[in-house]
Image (cartoon, helix red, strand yellow):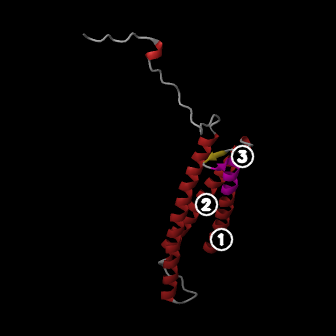
Amino acid sequence: MMSKTPPKADNYNFVPKEITTPIKDQTGISKTVFSHVSKLHGLLNNWVKLRDKGTKFCKVISSVKLHECENDYYPHQLKPIMDNLVEILESLKDIVDGVAILNDQLKALAQLQPTSQPVIFTWSATQISKTVQNIYKSLLKEYRLKQVVTGI
């Protein structure tokens, strides 16, 4: 004997339901903050690369000046090196401006979320905003110092 196929009743049918996650962010603040932090990470990586490149140019300038060893002499090799250093400084300014924009946007997002509910791991939007503000202030100070060093 063959077995009968069970009848199609509602209690035998699988109907998938939406799985809710505990981190689900109804307002989208978490996603926006994460996006801004990712952009900040990219800007900081670029900052480090440019800073290292600028340091190499400064060492080259120093070695050229030491090789020529006269205070009133401006070696012709310095012109392209100084131009590159100025380009790096301008790129650093662009990064500072980008971090300033992210800083302003994160301040606004922190005000939109008045609670201390975490948006990324255990950090609230306010904590992230304050940290980015400190990063911005540090980068601005370093940029201004580099302006003084390059004479611009």
The three-letter amino acid code for the residue at tag 2 is Lys
Total labels: the figure holds 3
How far apart marks 3 and 2 lie (CA) works out to 33 Å
Q: Is residue 152 visible?
A: no
Q: Position of residue 140 (x, y in %)?
A: 66, 63
Q: Position of residue 30 (x, y in %)?
A: 62, 42
Say whether residue 19 is left or right of residue 108. left
Q: Is residue 29 magenta?
A: no
Q: Nearer the viewer, mark 3 or mark 2?
A: 3
Q: Which residues are magenta?
A: 122-132
How far apart marks 3 and 1 lie (CA) works out to 36 Å
Q: Is residue 38 visible?
A: yes
State the residue position of label 2.
Answer: 93
Residue depicted at 71% across the width and 48% down the height = 107
Q: Residue furthest left?
A: 1
74 shown above or below 98: below
Marks 2 and 1: in contact by CB < 8 Å? no
| Residue closer to the observer: 14 or 64 | 14
The three-letter amino acid code for the residue at tag 1 is Leu
Label 3 SS: loop
Image disc number at residue 145:
1
24 shown above or below 149: above
> In terms of sequence position, does the residue under pointer 3 or pointer 2 come before the other?
2
Label 2 SS: helix
Crowding near pointer 1: few (<14 within 10 Å), some, many (20+)?
few
Image disc number at residue 109:
none
Label 1 SS: helix
State the residue position of label 3.
Answer: 116
Residue depicted at 39% across the width and 9% down the height = 7
